[in-house]
Amino acid sequence: MTLTVKEAILQRRSIKKFNGQSVEKEAVVEILDDAKWAPNHGNRQPWRVVVGAGETLPKVHELLRDLAIPKWQELSEEVLATQMQKYTLAGAYAFVLVKEDMRQKERLEDYAATSCYLQNVQLLAWDKGIGTCWKTPGFLDHPKFREALNASANERVMSMLQFGHFDEAPKAKERKEVSGFITEFTS
């Protein structure tokens, strides 16, 4: 499928119910590579991405289990499997990190650029029929998680992006009318 930019923007949905079908690592890497054309000040390209797909996916699941479900060992296998579905049904992961510049202006620019990069990733994935969900769970800052991603002291884990195939896209949620968020310049 090849969508126009407008179609991709208007049709893309955050997918929270994946069907468990695997997502090829090569497809994810191609999406991540194409997304690098996001606007960014000074062409700093401040993002770094850690991919979990294919043979590394079980290690990602183990880490997510340990951090997202801290008392997992006390659960029955059935209950644990049910709770883990929100992680195990995704076919791949991309953990997006951003450099934290000490200069406030550059830090804001880098966060904005990385957000643009993430949006590009989501639109490109959607164009390939792959759903995504941008998540920011609290454990992204956990020392064990940062260590697993080899995050340096000057990097912030900005996103846990899930990739996966899905059977049905959710309906679009209501958005504000343009008149609800613009005003005219008056000075």
Image (spheres, rainbow, N blue to C red):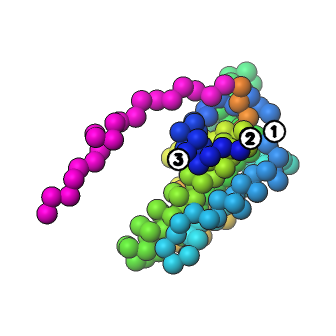
In terms of secondary structure, where does tag 2 sit?
loop
In the displayed structure image, the side of residue 5 where residue 1 appears, left or right: right
Q: Which residue is drawn at 79% across and 42% down?
A: 23
Q: Where is residue 109 in the image (x, y as percent from the top left)?
A: 44, 69
Q: Name the residue under label 3.
A: 136
Which of the two marks, 2 or 1, is nearer to us in this view? 2
In front: 186, or 169? Answer: 186
How far apart marks 1 and 3 lie (CA) works out to: 22 Å
Q: Mark 2 points at which residue?
A: 1
- Amino acid on which disc 1 is placed: Ser
Magenta span: 168-187
How far apart marks 3 and 2 lie (CA) works out to: 29 Å
In terms of secondary structure, where does tag 1 sit?
loop
Question: Magenta-highlighted stretch: main secondary structure?
Answer: loop
Q: Does the magenta stretch include residue 181?
A: yes
Q: Which residue is drawn at 66% across and 43% down?
A: 3
How far apart marks 2 and 1 lie (CA) works out to: 19 Å
| Residue 104 falls in image quadrant | bottom left
The residue sitting at the right extreme is 55
Q: Residue 22 carries which label?
A: 1
